[in-house]
Amino acid sequence: MQTVKQSAMALFLAVISFTASAHPHSFIDLQTELVTDGTQLSGLKMRWTMDEITSADLLYDAGNAKPGDEIWKKLAAEVMANVLGQHYFTEFWHNGQKVKFLNRPTEYGMTRDGHQAVLTFVLPLAHPQPLAGQTYRFSTFDPTYYVDMRYGKDSDVRLPDALQKSCKIGVHTPKPSEETLNFAVSLDKEDAPPEDMELGKQFAQEVTLQCQ
């Protein structure tokens, strides 16, 4: 199996690390399942499905590699390193305070789904959080809005069976102002929004978890 093309990997890592900016020029479909340990929330199990254009370069050298082959491990490790560099592109809040994550995922991998690359990983909370009577909020987004990261439907965020009766999930999709929309559309790959504008956050869906 030949090594991953440097040009292909450089392109994807540029997308994931956002050394260039555009708004948006890549798309990731999100799915998330809550990971619990008894009565506590311990992490988020995430599945990120890349759009076909981004995936084409990532998957070129994977060829017909089977799941578990070394090339998949190499791809997953390099992509995951850049995701970690951006704090998993995720913010998690409880009582107005950010909840911290561990620096490394407890598991991760990459696979192919048709013509799309799929990154899966478990985002572990630094400390398990109580569920009973608590409310949490979290969002996954690219701060520069180079990549559009979103849930296609509310059911793409799932509770484990044990929490179905005691907890509920809501997915809120924001409606940015016309001015913000026009600004995002006006930017191309060579443009970057001001950091303090937090452009991507204005388009980010927010998931709310409420437990009895």
Image: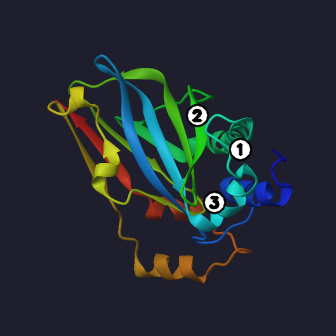
> Which element carries disc 1, helix, strand or loop?
helix
Residue 139: image x %, image y %? 43, 49
> Which element carries disc 2, helix, strand or loop?
strand
Rounded to the nearest angstrom, the CA distance separating label 2 from label 1 is: 11 Å
Q: Residues within 10 Å of mark 3 (few under 14, many from 20)?
A: many
**Rendered residue at 28%/50% (across/down):** 155
Q: Nearer the viewer, residue 45 or 190?
A: 45
Residue type, mark 1 in image: Leu
Rounded to the nearest angstrom, the CA distance separating label 1 from label 3 is: 11 Å
* 173 lies left or right of 86: left
Q: Quadrant of the N terminus?
A: top right
184 w.r.t. 115: above or below = below
Residue type, mark 2 in image: Tyr
Residue type, mark 3 in image: Ser
Q: Which residue is mark 1?
A: 75
163 w.r.t. 64: above or below = above
Closer to the chain start, of discs 2 and 1, is 1
Q: Which residue is mark 2?
A: 108
Does the rendering let one see residue 51? Answer: yes
Mark number displayed over residue 55 = 3
Does the rendering let one see residue 145? Answer: no
Residue 94: image x %, image y %? 37, 34
Mark number displayed over residue 176 = none
* 76 lies left or right of 156: right
**Rendered residue at 77%/54% (across/down):** 9
Closer to the chain start, of discs 1 and 3, is 3
The image quarter containing residue 119 is top right
**Rendered residue at 66%/54% (across/down):** 16
Q: Residues within 10 Å of mark 1 (few under 14, many from 20)?
A: many
1 w.r.t. 73: above or below = below
> Which element carries disc 3, helix, strand or loop?
helix
Q: Residues within 10 Å of mark 2 (few under 14, many from 20)?
A: some
